[in-house]
Each structure stands twice: as structure tokens, then as C-alpha cells.
């Protein structure tokens, strides 16, 4: 057994010191346990945006941003992307191990037979304005699951928790497709249980009664790959939100609805929407060079969206995987779209430009996912919804992990107060 380590922290103002234990991870840096710090020194720590603070212990996903490493339960994302499927990855995230044939068959059967929505959902959905953003509808609809599945939900029962996770993985695609069809005035489609996960979703999205949907296998494979790449990403804003809400003992459907709301932000899940907006702003393929020069000028106010990453300081391993699929999809479908021409020209220029190479500003997964969604005919306002379908697998895995912890605490960050000092109330007539 390895010897426990600690760090000694001294306060120069008071002369007080405290020995703080180090919490090692199986891979990656250790963390300093600061729980004793306030009592020993009278100080809290300040870490805006939690850049250097670990909020939990987790065995689900590991990221090394400097080396461009992403692993789910120890499996490199490159191997999972090449050899696995989204539903198998969802099982892995939830259970910690890859399933054997019997386990996967049982899991797939459960997910497939929980895809239906209660008919009362239709009335709730039809209460939204027809032009409501699909993410607004998805947030409300996922949250409303708490009203349909609250009886018998014993959060102390691991089997009830597992069933809630299954329902979310199964029903979020059904809800997402319903939100899309309602927004364009199409009749809702029920899930077809004879189809696999991604095919079933695409049929719910695009099939019309007048003609059967003929799916190109490349389309289904591309979407399945995107779902794998987006399934989890450690303690990002939306996952941290799910865990924070979950720490209160809230209903799991409410926790995931909170995650959907957090994902909606343009700095998080809405980044691939921002990529398409940027491409529209550039306008023409021949104007890409001018856009790149504007992006280099910090005073121009113009940014290239979909380049670089807050965590990955070298390259985004997901982007390396999806880049190949992007070009395959475009070649297979023969899409003739000026916006996609702009994207490919921008990729070509940026990958050769010394400014971007020196700063390691490579196209990230948001850049390529936006291009693929566009090529598949998925409207821009649905991009973040697609992200939410995939990330539901990660959210429920983290919720399950947290719910099983014996020493789980309610999340309660502290603050540095910078407001008024104490002052006395003055009656209105004297102000």
C-alpha cells in the first residue's frame, strides 16, 4: 500500500499552517483535500469557474487535455468509436464494464421498450408556441417526466434508480423528435421497436406517412459515432449541474432537465450552432481568407467558432475521429451546400496557417459535428438537442454513481463577498 502524502500550507499573515492530505487518482494529477482549511486558517479558497477544483470522485471518464486523451471507463475513445456502438457505450458508462452478448441484448430490449411517451405528453407539447426553440421544449418535456414517474420512485433502491436511467436514455430521443416535428407542423411519429437505436430516432425525425424513409447506412453510422463522442466529457458545466441538483436528492428527471438547460448555452452545447452562424457570417468560400485574417486581429471582434478547446491544449481526440467521418458523409451524400464549402475551405486554410498551428487552434468536435448535422438535413436549432440525446447517457451514469455514494454531500459552493459592509436602514422619507 502506498504511503499517504500531504502538503503543508502556511498563512504568512497569521503564521498558522495546516497539513492537507493529497487524494491520488488512478491516473492524472492528485488533488489537495482542503476540507480542513477553513477551520485551521479561517480562509476559504477562490477558484472562479472551478478551473482547478475537483468537485467529486468519479470512475467514469478521464481526460488528459495536454496529451489529447479521452477515456470512458478506461477505454480510449478511439477504440470505442471504431469498434463499439452508442448503446453499448451507454451500458459501459452506466455499469462500468462492457456487456457480454446476453447483457447487451437485455439492455437493448429494456431501452427499446421504454421509448414510448405517455399520450398526455402530446397535450403538454402542444401547449408550446409552434416557433419555440426545441431546446426550450426539450427542457420542459424532460422535466415533466418527473410528474409521470414519481410514484414508486424510491431513490434508496438501486433497481429503481437504474430503471429511471433506462427511461431517460430511451425517452429523450422520442421527446427530441416530437419537439422537432411539432416545430415544423408534422404529425408525431411513434418509435418503431423493430429498429435499432439510431435508426429508430431518424425514422421518428424524418419519416412521413406518404412514403417510407430510405436510410443511407452512412447517415446512421455517422450519427451513432457522434453520439459516442458526445456521450460524456467528465465534469463539464451540464454534468456538474446534474450532479449539483442530484446532490439535493431531487427527482432524476428534474436533474437531467437541469442538465439540458445548462447544455443550451452557446459556450457549451450550443457551440456547434455558433459554428453554423459563423459560416453564414463569412458568406462565401472565397471570403474565408479575409475571415481568417480578421480572426487574427484581436481588435476586429470576429472569432472563429469551433477551433481550440478549453480542456484540450493540443488537439481534441474526438475531432480527429469525426473529421474522417465528416469527409466520408459529404462524399457519400454528394451534398451541394455553399455553407459546407465554406467550412471545408476554412478547415483547409486554418490547418495550414502558422498562426493557428502555433497556438494549437485546431478544429474541434463542435466544428465537425455542425457540418455533419447540416449535411444530414438536421436544422441548426436541433444541433444542441442532438448533443443532449447523446449526453443523457453520461448524465445518468454520473447521477447513478453519485446516488450510490455513502458519503455524498449536498453541493454548496462558497463565495468572496464584495458587497456593502453593514449599514442601517433609512426610512423612505429620509432618503
Image: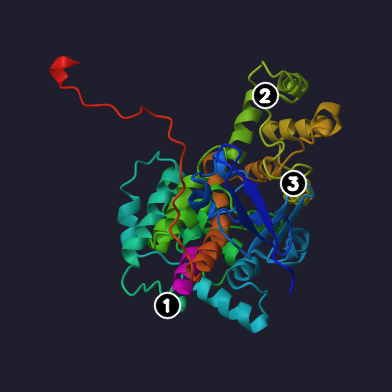
Give the residue number, with chain letter if any, for mark 1.
157
Q: Quadrant of residue 4?
A: bottom right
Location of the C terminus by quadrant is top left
Identity of the residue drawn at 33% across and 68% down? 150
Any mark on residue 282, and which? 2
Residue 301, given in percent of the width and then of the height, sits at: 63, 19
- Of callouts 3 and 2, the N-terminal one: 2
Dot 3 surroundings within 10 Å: few (below 14), some, or many (20 or more)?
A: many
Whichever of callouts 1 and 3 sits on the residue coming sooner in the sequence is 1
- Specify whether residue 379 is in view: no
Residue in the image at 50% along x and 71% along y: 404
For the residue labelled by badge 2, is the local secondary structure a helix, a strand or a loop?
A: helix
Q: Nearer the viewer, residue 366 or 108?
A: 366
Q: What is the spatial separation of the Cα atoms under label 1 and label 3, in whole angstroms?
A: 38 Å
The residue stretch that appears in magenta = 161-170
Residue 316, label in figure: 3
Amino acid at each position: 500500500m502506498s504511503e499517504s502524502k500531504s502538503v503543508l500550507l502556511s498563512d504568512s499573515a497569521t503564521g498558522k499552517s495546516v497539513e492537507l492530505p493529497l487524494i491520488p487518482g488512478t491516473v492524472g494529477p492528485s488533488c489537495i483535500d482542503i476540507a480542513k482549511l477553513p477551520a485551521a486558517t479561517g480562509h476559504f479558497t477562490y477558484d472562479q469557474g472551478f478551473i482547478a477544483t475537483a468537485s467529486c470522485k468519479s470512475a467514469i471518464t478521464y481526460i488528459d487535455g495536454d496529451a489529447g486523451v479521452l477515456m470512458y471507463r478506461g477505454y480510449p475513445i478511439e477504440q470505442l468509436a471504431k469498434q463499439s456502438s452508442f448503446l453499448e457505450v451507454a451500458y459501459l458508462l452506466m455499469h462500468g464494464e462492457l456487456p457480454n452478448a446476453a447483457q447487451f441484448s437485455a439492455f437493448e430490449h429494456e431501452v427499446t421498450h421504454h421509448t414510448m411517451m405517455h399520450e398526455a405528453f402530446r397535450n403538454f407539447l402542444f401547449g408550446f408556441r409552434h416557433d419555440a426553440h426545441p431546446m426550450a421544449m426539450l427542457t420542459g418535456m424532460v422535466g415533466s417526466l418527473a410528474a409521470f414517474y414519481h410514484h414508486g420512485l424510491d431513490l434508496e433502491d438501486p433497481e429503481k434508480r437504474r430503471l429511471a436511467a433506462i427511461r431517460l436514455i430511451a425517452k429523450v430521443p422520442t421527446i427530441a423528435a416530437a419537439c422537432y416535428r411539432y416545430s415544423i407542423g408534422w404529425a408525431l411519429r411513434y418509435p418503431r421497436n423493430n429498429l435499432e437505436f439510431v435508426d429508430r430516432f431518424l425514422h421518428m425525425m424524418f419519416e412521413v406517412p406518404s412514403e417510407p424513409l430510405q436510410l443511407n447506412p452512412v447517415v446512421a453510422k455517422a450519427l451513432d459515432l457522434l453520439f459516442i463522442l458526445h456521450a460524456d466529457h467528465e465534469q463539464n458545466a451540464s454534468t456538474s449541474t446534474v450532479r449539483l441538483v442530484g446532490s439535493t436528492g431531487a427527482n432524476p428527471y428534474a436533474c437531467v432537465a437541469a442538465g439540458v438547460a445548462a447544455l443550451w448555452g452557446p459556450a457549451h452545447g450550443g457551440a456547434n450552432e455558433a459554428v453554423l452562424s459563423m459560416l453564414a457570417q463569412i458568406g462565401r468560400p472565397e471570403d474565408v481568407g479575409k475571415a481568417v485574417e480578421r480572426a487574427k486581429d484581436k481588435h476586429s471582434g470576429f472569432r472563429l467558432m469551433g477551433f481550440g478547446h478549453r480542456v484540450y491544449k493540443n488537439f481534441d481526440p474526438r475531432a480527429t475521429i469525426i473529421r474522417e467521418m465528416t469527409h466520408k458523409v459529404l462524399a457519400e451524400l454528394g451534398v451541394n451546400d455553399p455553407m459546407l464549402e465554406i467550412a471545408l475551405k476554412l478547415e483547409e486554410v486554418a490547418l495550414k496557417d502558422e498562426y493557428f498551428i502555433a497556438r494549437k487552434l485546431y478544429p474541434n468536435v463542435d466544428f465537425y459535428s455542425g457540418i455533419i448535422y447540416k449535411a444530414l438535413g438536421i436544422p441548426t436549432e436541433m444541433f444542441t438537442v442532438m448533443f443532449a440525446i447523446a449526453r443523457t447517457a453520461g448524465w445518468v451514469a454520473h447521477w447513478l454513481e453519485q446516488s450510490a455514494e455513502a458519503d455524498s454531500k449536498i453541493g454548496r459552493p462558497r463565495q468572496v463577498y464584495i458587497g456593502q459592509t453593514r449599514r442601517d436602514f433609512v426610512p423612505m422619507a429620509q432618503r
